[in-house]
Image: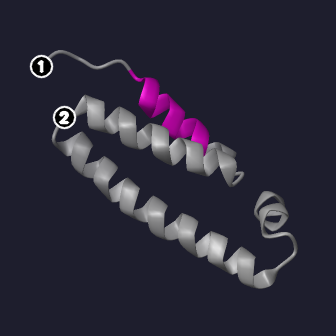
Amino acid sequence: MKRLRDFADGSEDSLRELVTLFVTQTTEQLGQLAEAIRALDAAEVRRLAHSCAGASATCGMSSLAQLLRELELKPTRAR
């Protein structure tokens, strides 16, 4: 929360907007990520994991960012 409060520069309205934006976009991208995993689309999995990891890290969600980085870098298996 400290990271988000820093971005919001002390404004509760800005903080609420940032949190809402992060949750909305991340929820959408995690749904797309699940679809890409089901479809075995490694390139799309890497792209989405990278995007979500970056946003999560920027917002101070380091545990989530780390998990997404691991998924992004996971080697693919041949089918």
Q: Provide the major secondary structure of the magenta segment.
A: helix
Asked if the stretch drawn in magenta spans residue 72, the answer is yes
Give me the residue at 73% from left, 75% from top.
15
Q: Are marks 1 and 2 in contact (CB under 8 Å)?
A: yes
Give me the residue at 37% from left, 63% from top.
28
The image quadrant of residue 39 is: top left
Check disc 2: other Cα within 10 Å, few if <14, some if 14-19, many if 20+.
some
Secondary structure type for disc 2: loop
Q: In the image, residue 72 lies at what x, y percent?
A: 43, 30
Q: Mark 2 belongs to which amino acid?
A: Leu
Is residue 43 rendered to the left or right of residue 50? left
Q: CA distance from mark 1 to mark 2?
A: 9 Å
**Visible in this render: residue 61?**
no
* Quadrant in which the N terminus is drawn: bottom right
Give me the residue at 82% from left, 79% from top.
11
Name which of mark 1 and mark 2 comes first in the sequence: 2
Q: In the image, residue 23 lies at what x, y percent?
A: 53, 68
Asked if the stretch drawn in magenta spans residue 32, the answer is no
Range of magenta residues: 64-74
Q: Which one is in front, 8 or 23? A: 8
Secondary structure type for disc 1: loop
The image quadrant of residue 19 is: bottom right
Check disc 1: other Cα within 10 Å, few if <14, some if 14-19, many if 20+.
few
Query: Residue 40 got which mark?
Result: 2
Which residue lies under the disc numbered 1? 79
Q: Which one is in front, 39 or 48? A: 48
Is residue 41 rendered to the left or right of residue 46? left
Give me the residue at 67% from left, 49% from top.
58
